[in-house]
Image: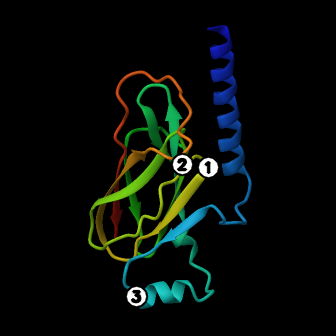
Amino acid sequence: MRNLLIALTGFLVGSGLIAGLLFALPHTSTANVKQATPQAATPQIKSMSSGKMAPASLATRKLTISHVQRGCHVWSDGKPMGAMMRLHLKQGQKLTILDQDVDAHQMIELAGPMHLQMGAPMMMNHGTTLAFMKKGVYRLGTKTVEMAGGAMEVKTSGPDNHLRLVVTVA
């Protein structure tokens, strides 16, 4: 029992340090981030990929899927955490989601004005970036996915949270 407590404490402290470093260090590489774009290219997407700098008002927002003991996983934007998150973005703005949970998560689109490509499931320390090119309300969620090699067994209490995200693009 003592060894389990020591291992769990080490895991939580290590995860916290990794998460802190990821947010503290500047991001210069996108090797682990997959770009999600709509099925049909629009002129707005082409202009954003032509090398022009996006205005500061269109800065990429960041969300993290974090591991917690009660409910297994929650959304976090550096502020209070929860299984349900609401965001307001501007048209053309991007959202980067990083998985810091022990489970692999697949982003799913429940409703929205355009189809987003969600990419492959995100394993721990991997993420995806979604571009919101049309105005409207996007209802997103995640589902946990069994990956080869399996996830680490970590004790949690209560049922697992169903992560839901409502993104309003105006």
Q: Secondary structure at mark 1?
A: loop
Relative side of 114 to 18, left or right: left
Amino acid beneath label 1: Asn
Q: Residue 125 has which mark?
A: 1
Q: Residue 42 has which mark?
A: 3
Question: Which mark lies nearer to you, 3 or 1?
Answer: 1
Depth order, front residue of 74/80: 74
- Residue found at x 56% / y 33%: 152
- The answer for how far apart the CA atoms under marks 2 and 1 are is 6 Å
Image position, residue 74 (x, y; %): 45, 39
Depth order, front residue of 3/59: 3
Crowd band around label 2 with a 10 angstrom C-alpha radius: few (<14), some (14–19), many (20+): many
- Asked if labels 1 and 2 touch by Cβ distance under 8 angstroms, the answer is yes
Amino acid beneath label 3: Thr
- Residue found at x 55% / y 66%: 34
Amino acid beneath label 2: Asp
Crowd band around label 1 with a 10 angstrom C-alpha radius: few (<14), some (14–19), many (20+): some
- The answer for how far apart the CA atoms under marks 3 and 2 are is 29 Å
According to the picture, the residue beneath numbered tag 2 turns out to be: 99
134 lies above or below 1: below
